[in-house]
Amino acid sequence: MVRFSRRGLIAYGIGTAAGVTAAGSAPALAKGGSTSVPRSTWTSFARTLDGPVWLPGTRQYTSAKKLFNPTFDTREPAAVVRVRRRRDVQRAVVFAAEHDLKISVRGGGHSYVGASALSGTMQLDLRDYAKVSYTSSTKRVTVQAGAGLRTVHVALSPHGRSIPTGSCPTVGTAGLTVGGGIGIDSRRYGLTCDVLVAATVVLPGGDVVTASRTSHPDLFWALQGGGGGLNGVVTDLTYTTHPVGSRATFSLAYPASAAVKVMTGWAKWLESADRHRWANVHIGTDGRGSITVKVVGVTDAGDEHDAAASLSSHIGVHSSRSSYRRRSPMELVDYLEGGATSARESFSAGTDVLAALDTSTATAILATVKKRAHSTQKSAAVLDPLDGAIHSRKSTDSVFPWRSELVSVQWYTNVSGADGRTAGREWVQHGHAAVKTASRGGFVNYLVSGDPASRYFADNASRLAKIRRHYDPEKLIQSGLRV
């Protein structure tokens, strides 16, 4: 996710661990599905859990249901169920089915469509189920589904290991993984879902299964890029890890007049760049009427100047400013994450996946960004590479279909107020239209509301729908996807 504000770039219950908290003015019933669940029923249910259950009208509910994007603060889940053990998940799933409640699952709460706080659903909040366990003999790590990305990096850093992830510290590892997961190590090691070797899933009936290439392989396939909450609740994920050593970053700024050359030169550079080299492009607004053009790169320590020089030679324009710095693995994490936490941020966003980036498409991207230049809200088109190790798998090996494409363009704009949200959504749609002839579809980690599944999964959409009909025919678990 782009972090404009952070980077410049872009105690539960009231006496028992499992109590329902209630205010005197709370409604007598919590609504959900086509039924009304009495408060006494929620109270009885809460006594079976290790974690709390919070209902509308309580201070804890009002706070707990909030997601990263304040745009969704008006959402009203039937209840927030904060689980602490896998058995809590099992009991919650069974309870929801018995009472005609749909479920929305929360890991980090960063869904672009607010999928983890859908009104009328039981919000199953996993953030207290967040342990990370590394096994040195297998060099594998098992992550509970409520762990954020920073928690994983902190746990693995002492072992000199990591997994390829995104860069926002509070994004949920589970949600990132089941959507695909791109980041600075994608060119070298592939997507986050590509290093997944097994996942524990609570099915809609309450049964627990382990999905892998040899056990429930259809479910395992669906968990590799199919988006969250389609077939069950993922509670634990096991990954292979890769070694990490000293890294380096470089940053190159260019005048706005060079934007098109920067984009097309960068795309050309990707075709021959070693996989240990990564860079992305930010074409943005500064909130004061100007366009900013920046390249941020990551490579092995000692290679930063050569990598930047190679990229610059493909761009053919001298940078106006540059900076270089060598960093330890955790220093790199801190740099990219902008800190250990993420402040809540109102935004509109979307994505397009491109097989190539020519002058015409780059010009259209620049023109789209310019449309937001006079807004006081910062906006950007962020171009991330989709090549390298991502191309090592076939498009049908996982749900994630973009195995021969080159670029993910993320449209991202900060917004303020109802009018600002409308303008932001319109700008994102304009971006889609501007690159329509070059776009192959979108990246489900950057889901846009109302889009058909085919836009994110291409020819894999029908197989994914078939698997969902098998595991969750009643569509108990909701995700914001029309599958």
Image (cartoon, helix red, strand yellow):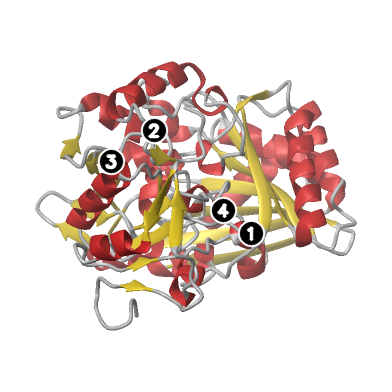
**Is residue 186 positioned above or below 85 on the image?**
above
Residue 130 in which image quadrant = bottom left
Alpha carbons under labels 1 and 4: distance apart: 18 Å
Decide which of tag 4 and tag 2 comes sooner along the chain.
4
Kindly state the secondary structure of the residue where label 2 is placed.
loop
Q: Amino acid at mark 3?
A: Leu
Decide which of tag 1 and tag 4 comes sooner along the chain.
4
Decide which of tag 1 and tag 2 comes sooner along the chain.
1
Q: Nearer the viewer, residue 119 or 125?
A: 119
Disc 4 marks which residue? 1
Q: Nearer the viewer, residue 402 or 20?
A: 20
**Front: mark 3 or 1:** 3
Disc 2 marks which residue? 475
**Front: mark 2 or 3:** 2
Q: What residue appears at the point 73 percent right and 25 percent down from the top-left corner?
A: 436
Alpha carbons under labels 4 and 3: distance apart: 21 Å
**Front: mark 1 or 2:** 2
Kindly state the secondary structure of the residue where label 1 is placed.
strand
**Front: mark 1 or 4:** 4
- Which disc number belongs to residue 251? 1
**Front: mark 4 or 2:** 2
Alpha carbons under labels 1 and 2: distance apart: 46 Å
Decide which of tag 2 and tag 3 comes sooner along the chain.
3
Q: Residues within 10 Å of mark 2 (few under 14, many from 20)?
A: some
Alpha carbons under labels 3 and 1: distance apart: 31 Å
**Is residue 362 positioned above or below 411 on the image?**
above
Q: Position of residue 185 (x, y in %)?
A: 43, 47
Q: Is residue 410 visible?
A: no
Q: Amino acid at mark 1?
A: Ser
